[in-house]
Amino acid sequence: MSDKQANGHLARAIELEKEGSIEEAIAAYQQACTNLPLGRDSCFGLARSCVLAGRLNEACQALKQWLDQQDQDAEAWERLGRVYAVLHSYSLATNCLRRALEIDDRRLEAKQTLLYTLKQMGQTEALVETANSILHQIPGHLPALVASALSLPLIYRDVADLRKYRHRYM
């Protein structure tokens, strides 16, 4: 397939997705993805459409396929982590999100999702450490990001020794 054909499939996929024709968009993205080297937009679009269609395992495959070529793409690791979180594969999600943060530690949405996965896994100390790193990243106030992702009273209720951690947030 030529680059021109792949770009045509990509453009068609984007239009189909906008129109709400998700299954057709997936097919067009898959055609665009058959062109090597694989394109980031094609892989991300395919993953997004698969998520919209509830085909989460296929979304994971599309993102992994991209990461096989570009393993330093923090956004791709973050997206894969979010899909794993939706699949309740919290250990895999945590690994992907940590990888995204190794590459780019400023990714607040990755930290937000990591907070959620750590809470789901019952890893309270890691949860508190991650929340603390967000507070240090945005000093002077408790970011709305953390408050919306996870209510601190819920963290405290889960922490065995509240006094040990309260000073970090109060």
Image: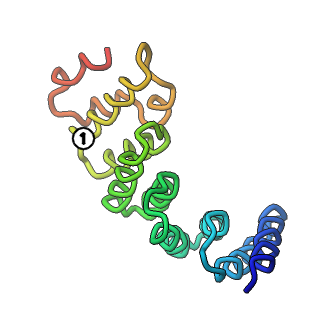
Q: How is the image coloured?
A: rainbow
Residue named by callout 1? 126
Q: Amino acid at mark 1?
A: Ala
User: Residue drawn at (42%, 13%), measured in percent from left and top?
Assistant: 140
User: Residue drawn at (45%, 36%), measured in percent from left and top?
Assistant: 106
- The part of the image, by quadrant, that contains residue 163 is top left
Q: Is residue 19 left or right of residue 91?
A: right
Look at the picture and state if 2 lies above or below 147. below
Query: Given the current orientation, which residue lies at the most extreme bottom position?
Result: 1
Secondary structure type for disc 1: helix
Q: Quadrant of the C terminus?
A: top left
The residue nearer to you, when weighing 3 against 87, is 3
- The part of the image, by quadrant, that contains residue 119 is top left
Q: Is residue 42 left or right of residue 4?
A: left
User: Residue drawn at (77%, 78%), measured in percent from left and top?
Assistant: 24
Residue 130 lies, in percent from the top left, at 32, 36
Look at the picture and state if 82 lies above or below 115. below
Residue 93 lies, in percent from the top left, at 38, 58
Look at the picture and state if 33 lies above or below 79. below
- The part of the image, by quadrant, that contains residue 150 is top left
Q: State the count of labels.
A: 1
The residue nearer to you, when weighing 21 against 72, is 72
Residue 166 lies, in percent from the top left, at 24, 20
